[in-house]
Image (spheres, rainbow, N blue to C red):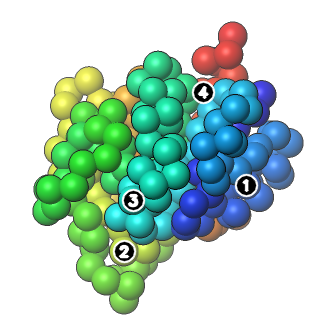
Amino acid sequence: MRIAVLAVQGAFIEHEIVLRDLDVDCFEIRQSSDLLQDFDGLVLPGGESTVMGKLLMELNLFEPLKNKITHGTPVLATCAGLILLADKLENDKTKHFQTLPVTVKRNAYGRQLGSFQTVAEMKGIGTVPMTFIRAPYIAEAIPDVDVLAKVDNKIVAVRYKNQLAMSFHPELTKDNSIHKYFVQMVRNNIN
């Protein structure tokens, strides 16, 4: 099993550390030639979604990655990664991959000072620590989307087919249960 981590901007190194701690082989996608390597799963990290979206286009990564996601490659998306996957953005006309049938509100919790940590139940995983940094939340999801977690009655984690997406940063805590869940998704997809 090999997992690719989008590494053009954001908190990609933290995801790589968690994956390596789980003995998972991973590598960084920084340019189109990196897509020549085989991979079984993809991580879209948190960061600045506008910058990531622009770099995906400039580096010719957008279409190949969208194609991989559309054709079933499991993806773990956190914070900005969730925004990249979202079909619609509530407060923004920008469009990215549009593979996840949800409407996301960007910067829903305010600026950096609105960042916070909490602990909440995540369906199929249990209680997990959640770190929200200038985080979005999911304002709407179609019925086929499995809502995995809510905080203050706002949807903060979902699963839809091969896509696991959340508003928060599991890579910034010592709890690796969400990454374990994702690794199992990848294993199940391989078999």
Looking at the picture, which amino acid does disc 2 mark? Arg
* Vertical order, 127 against 68 (above or below): below
Residue at image mark 3: 54
Q: Earlier in the sequence, mark 3 or mark 1?
A: 1
Instruction: Assess disc 2: are there few (<14), some (14-19) or many (≥20) residues with their C-alpha within 10 Å of its C-alpha.
Output: many
Secondary element at tag 3: helix
- Image side of residue 145 versus residue 123, left or right: left
Quarter of the C terminus within the rendering: top right
- The three-letter code of the residue at mark 1 reads Glu
Packing grade of label 3 (10 A; few <14, some 14-19, many >=20) is few
Q: Residue at x 14, y 62 (%)?
A: 91
Q: Earlier in the sequence, mark 4 or mark 3?
A: 3
Judge from the rendering whether residue 31 lies leftward or rightward of residue 112; answer left or right.
Answer: right
Q: Is residue 108 above or below residue 140?
A: below
The answer to whether residue 24 is left or right of residue 86 is right
The residue under label 4 is which amino acid type?
Answer: Met
Q: CA distance from mark 3 to mark 1?
A: 23 Å
Mark closer to the observer (2, 3): 3
Helix, strand or loop under label 4: helix
**Mark 1 sits on what residue?**
16
Q: Secondary structure at mark 1?
A: helix
Alpha carbon of mark 1 to alpha carbon of mark 4: how far? 17 Å
> Measured from the top left, where is residue 142 in percent x and y?
19, 31
Counting other residues with Cα less than 10 Å from the Cα at mark 1, is it few (<14), some (14-19), or many (20 or more)?
Answer: many
Disc 3 marks a residue whose amino acid type is Lys
The label nearer to you, 3 versus 1, is: 3
Q: Which residue is mark 4?
A: 185
Residue 49 seen in the figure: no
Question: Considering the numbered disc 2 on the image, is that residue within a helix, a strand or a loop?
Answer: loop
| First reached walking from the N terminus: tag 1 or tag 4 | 1
| Residue underneath mark 2 | 134
